[in-house]
Image (spheres, helix red, strand yellow):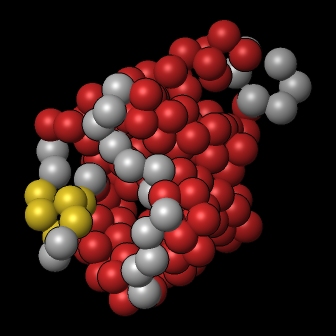
Amino acid sequence: MNRTLLLTLMALFVAIGTLGSQLIWFPAGIAKAYPVQHAVNVLAAVMLGPGPAVLIAFMIGLLRNMLGLGSLLAFPGGMIGAFLAGYLYKRFGKKYFAAFGEVIGTGIIGALFSVPFAKIIMGTSFGAFFFVPPFLISSITGAGIALFIVSRVKNEKFIQLKTNIKGD
């Protein structure tokens, strides 16, 4: 895959994640769950690898914050989940590991990282149990959506785009 195709796919994922997060959301405890962000993380991890997935998560968080549609907590949750999803998929080659990586990366590690992040950057102090349930609900839902989409794609070569990126 050439770099133009890679950048185009990344831009497409950013657009889907940014717009989709505002169209599809639901209350999760005291927070809002945005499963589209997590679905995009898993899809990008499987199709493009960990590096592009993290960059996509960063750009979605940045755009949502610039547009006043998200919080700063989109950064730690989204980026850690995207990285772990991409890393586990790259390591084991199974889409279920990507979904598991998203749930653990966002739902647990990202939520725990959000505690000091919220204190230092946002000036609010909440305990870990404040972030873990909504992050888990959102990431499990999004990972499930991504698994459904990936399992319905018939052309395996399309899913394996990341393997062709290296030399071009």
On screen, residue 27 above or below 20: below
**Going by the image, does 19 lie left or right of 89?**
left
Give the x, y percent position of residue 111: 47, 75
Could you tell me which quadrant the N terminus lies in?
top right
As rendered, which of 97 and 33 lies closer to the eye?
A: 33
Location of residue 81 (image quadrant): bottom right
Could you tell me which quadrant the C terminus lies in?
top right
**Going by the image, does 134 lie left or right of 87?**
left
Location of residue 148 (image quadrant): bottom left
Q: Would residue 110 be visible to someone looking at this image? A: no
On screen, residue 116 above or below 8: below
Q: Residue furthest top?
A: 4
Location of residue 136 (image quadrant): bottom left
As rendered, which of 101 and 1 lies closer to the eye?
A: 101
**Going by the image, does 157 lie left or right of 1?**
left
As rendered, which of 51 and 91 lies closer to the eye?
A: 51
* Residue drawn at the location 50% of the way across and 34% of the way down: 62
Q: Would residue 112 be visible to someone looking at this image? A: yes
Q: Residue furthest right?
A: 167
Give the x, y percent position of residue 167: 87, 25
Give the x, y percent position of residue 112: 53, 80
* Residue drawn at the location 60% of the way across and 65% of the way down: 120
* Residue drawn at the location 63% of the way across and 38% of the way down: 55
Give the x, y percent position of residue 93: 63, 63
